[in-house]
Amino acid sequence: MNLLPFENLPAYKPRSFVPNDINWNDWSQIAPFFDQLESRAAAAKTVADLERWLLDWSELNAAIDEEGSKRYIAMTCHTDSPEAEKSYLQFVEQIEPELKPRQFKLSQIFIAHPARPQLPKARYEVFDRDTNLHVELFRPENVPLETEEARLSQQYQKLTGALTVQFRGEEKTLVQMGRYLEEPDRAVRQEAWELVANRRLQEAEKIEDIFDQLVKLREQIAKNAGFKNYLEYAFRARGRFDYTPADCVQFHSAIEKEIMPALRELQAERREQLKLKALRPWDLAVDPLNRPPLRPFEQVDGMVSSTQKIFNQLDHALGQSFQQMQDLRLLDLANRKGKAPGGYQSTLSESRLPFIFMNAVGVQRDVETILHEAGHAFHALATRGEDLYAYRGAPIEFCEVASMSMELLGNEFIENFYAAPEAKRARRDHLEGILEIFPWIATVDAFQHWIYSHPGHSRAERKAAWEQLMNRFGGDVDWTGYESIRANLWHRQLHIFLHPFYYVEYGIAQLGALQVWANSKRDKAKALAAYKQALALGGSRPLPELFSTAGCKFEFSDTTMRPLVNLVQTELSKLN
């Protein structure tokens, strides 16, 4: 039974090292290829020999990665399928733990190889640096801990993916309830918001239990690797060569200084337009002039065809790429029960093709999501010709520039979804959303800085730290009577559970994307060409160079932020 939306996709290049009929459930069939690579390394005397060896290693990695991706896709598309869950967990619990020590061994062999210093420096410097890091951090005793971490993460996804509420006599997923927060009828909004918030609150103890276990595991992983705390370990493990925890703290301060005043202005304007004494949590998504919610499409097919038109207008090659994804059925976009929440793009590493997963319900946010994930997809397609597996992916900080720039560039053609007045509203919603997300990014990131620099903290201390950050970055919203919901808001942010410290990247990347957009205001063709050129580099160059190729500064102080905030505010005033 095929639980994947797509059928068998051909490999981008025929395999020359790994057989096509390998059984990925059986480690004894996979291990011999690691044995061969280990024994062949000594015979690789020349640079050409070593490069051939690296390509065979890449082929093996891509084949394994694609198998893992397919199982993850099947599991998230069908969280209610025992077959998909079993297949995914079998790979996570039985194959991945076996892989880690073998990958480490190959990394060690590469670092110690006598021909390595003769490899072309410009071509291999990033691969060299990253492989060195892998060798530095690997600890065999962390493998079972990482397996348990993946299992707990899956538990969190299963728990949150299954949550539903009864609303007006119908069972609704929490994602489907999001559209009621845009209803002009304030009583409907409040009812919908309370239902969802209370449903999450019912699971708070279970979520805290999962998180306590995750924190404990992560602290042990850091300790095993010789780090003072998980904060220091995570920065190293995420390959953050170009910025430090102190830079992130500076970034939080810049957001407080440059963005919070702009956010408070928007909130004050919203409160006046809605004629309210105070904004409540259910007043933040509704149109402030009480117009009915934006409904960009009724059916997901309509979303796809309108998105196709946007890419055709933006760039012929991008339009062709999006059409190819439809033809190969590389999209699963509609929300349904039993589907994991959220949205993502996953690269199938051997086919070198992107897959997009999301939960569309017919709201403006869906338009932003499809543009965003398509940006990731274009990034994956731009690197198809790169044979070194490690270079087909870029650092997350730049991956998100690819996706967030596409939201801003695609938004120029949003009339494919709306008539002119609604298009203005959609652009305004999107730009306001950018200003609103920065403080949330600062909250989530600063919260994780606090969590992992306070080993052994209690739940009460963690709650107090979160509340302090909400006071700093939450703006002017009245939570009276809902304090316990506010104290647990972080439970909905899956990155905290699944991908610790992966969130500040969105803020860094948003600054990059705003710069791409600012460049496009001056010269569309030049900005798009620079963007595509940077995408094609994949992960082959260091982060600051990827940014500069795209025409951006890799810098996130208040001096970089100020003109970009001014640009957003100027555009917002034009849209009034």
Image (cartoon, rainbow, N blue to C red):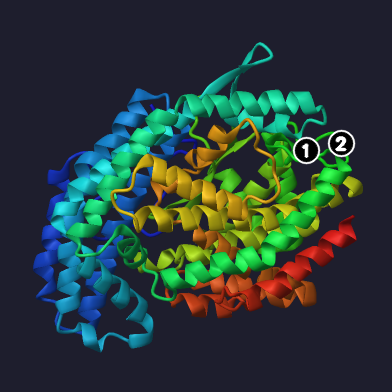
Count of numbered circles in the view: 2
Is 308 displayed left or right of 133 in the figure? right
Quick one: label 2, few (<14), some, or many (20+) residues within 10 Å?
Answer: some
Work out whether residue 158 or residue 290 is closer to the camera in this orientation and state it: 290
* The N terminus: image quadrant: top left
Determine which quarter of the picture holds residue 477. Answer: top right
* The C terminus: image quadrant: bottom right
Residue located 57% across and 62% down the image:
507
**Residue 65: x, y in percent?**
33, 52
**Residue 39: x, y in percent?**
8, 67
> On residue 290, which mark appears?
2
Residue 489 visible (yes or no)? yes
> On residue 286, which mark appears?
1
Kindly indicate whether the residue at mark 2 contacts the one at mark 1 (C-beta within 8 angstroms): yes
Work out whether residue 132 or residue 482 is closer to the camera in this orientation and state it: 482
**Residue 482: x, y in percent?**
61, 32
Work out whether residue 64 or residue 206 is closer to the camera in this orientation and state it: 206
